[in-house]
Image (cartoon, helix red, strand yellow):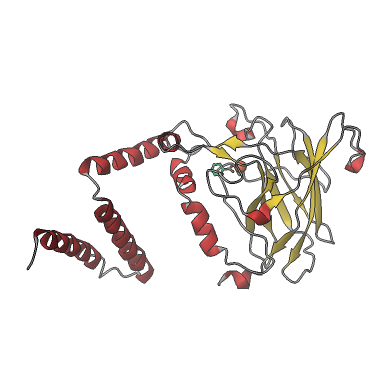
Amino acid sequence: MTTRDDIQANREQQLVERVIRSFGSCADPRLRELMVSLVGHLHAFIRETRLTEREWAAAIDFLTRCGHITDDKRQEFILLSDVLGASMQTITVNDHAKADATEATVFGPFFVENAPGIPLGGNIAGPAAGEPCWVEGRVTDTGGTPLAGARVEVWEADEDGLYDVQYDDDHTAGRAHLFTDEHGHYCFWGVTPTPYPIPHDGPVGQLLEHTGRSPMRAAHLHFMVSHPGHRTLVTHIFVRGGSHLDTDTVFGVKPSLVKDFQRQPAGTPAPGDRVIDGTWTRARFDIVLTPDSSSAP
Ligand code: BEZ
Ligand code: FE
C-alpha cells in the first residue's frame, strides 16, 4: 500500500532528479559533474534536516551579509570556507600524502605580494613588536637533494596578534622573502608567534559565537616556498605547547607542522652576534618540496 509518506518521499525524489536532469546538456563535463553532485548533496541536506523555509531564509540572509561585508580588504566567504573546514579539506584532497614531503595548510588572508627581500640571517620583523625568534632550516626535494635558490616567503602577526595590514597605516612589518643558499639553507629573525583571533566582527564571527566556537588560531608562522620544477608549498609552523592547537578555528594544525620554539634565557649569545636584552626563541623547520610532476595522486 502506498502511504502518504511514500508519496511525499516520491515527490521530493522526483524534484532532485528533475534538477539533476536540468544540467544534462551542460557541455563541460567537469562542471556538470560538480553541479550534479552539489545538487544531490544540497537536496539530501534539506530533506534529511527537514529544513524550514524560515531557516533557509536565515541562511540566505547570512550569505547576503557575508557579501555586504566583503570588499578588496575583507573576504568573508574565505573566512566562512575556513571555519567550515572546507578550505582545509580542499587542501588535504589536493595535497596527496607523499612520504616525507612537507604538509600544506591554509593560506589565510594576510599574505601580501612583493614583501621586502632580506639576506640570509636578516630580520622580517621590522617594526613588529615581539620576542625575537630565530628560524632556520633546509629546503630539499623528496630525495634529500638540497634546493639552492628556493624562494621562501614568510609572514606573521606581531605580539598583539595583528598583521601589519590590520593597522590603519601602510607600514610593512612581520613579512619578507629570502632565498636559500647553495646548501638549501635558510635562516632569519622574526618574532615568536602568539595565538590570535581571525576577524570575527562580521557574520562569520556571529556564526562562531552562536555555535559556541572560539575564533582563535593557534600561534603560527606562515611560509610559502617555491622552486622551479617543484610544487609551491603553502604552509605554517605552529608553536609546540601553545594554546588552541586542538581547537584552531580553521582546522589548520597538522602534527607534523608543530615545532619546538626553544626559549633561550636572557644573555644567551644569539646568531649573527645580535645583542638581545631579554629572552628569545629558536625553531627549526626543514622543508621538503615535491616535484611538479608528482602533484597528481
Ligand atoms: C591566518 O592564518 O592568517 C588566517 C587563516 C584563515 C583565516 C583567517 C586568518
Ligand atoms: Fe596567520
Q: Position of residue 65 (x, y in %)?
A: 36, 36
Which of 272 and 51 lies nearest the eye of the viewer? Answer: 51
Picture quarter with the C terminus: bottom right
| Residue ID at (47%, 30%) | 201
| Residue ID at (8%, 66%) | 2
Which of 216 and 119 lies nearest the eye of the viewer? Answer: 216
- Residue 114: in sight, yes or no? yes
**Where 289 sits versus 69, above or below?**
below
Q: In which quarter of the image is residue 95?
A: bottom right
Judged left or right of residue 144, residue 112 is left
Question: Which residue ends up furthest to the top in the rendered image?
Answer: 168
- Residue 224: in sight, yes or no? no
Q: Position of residue 115 (x, y in %)?
A: 68, 43
Question: Which residue ends up furthest to the front in the rendered image?
Answer: 1
**Where 7 sits versus 172, above or below?**
below
Q: Where is residue 85 in the image (x, y as percent from the top left)?
A: 48, 51
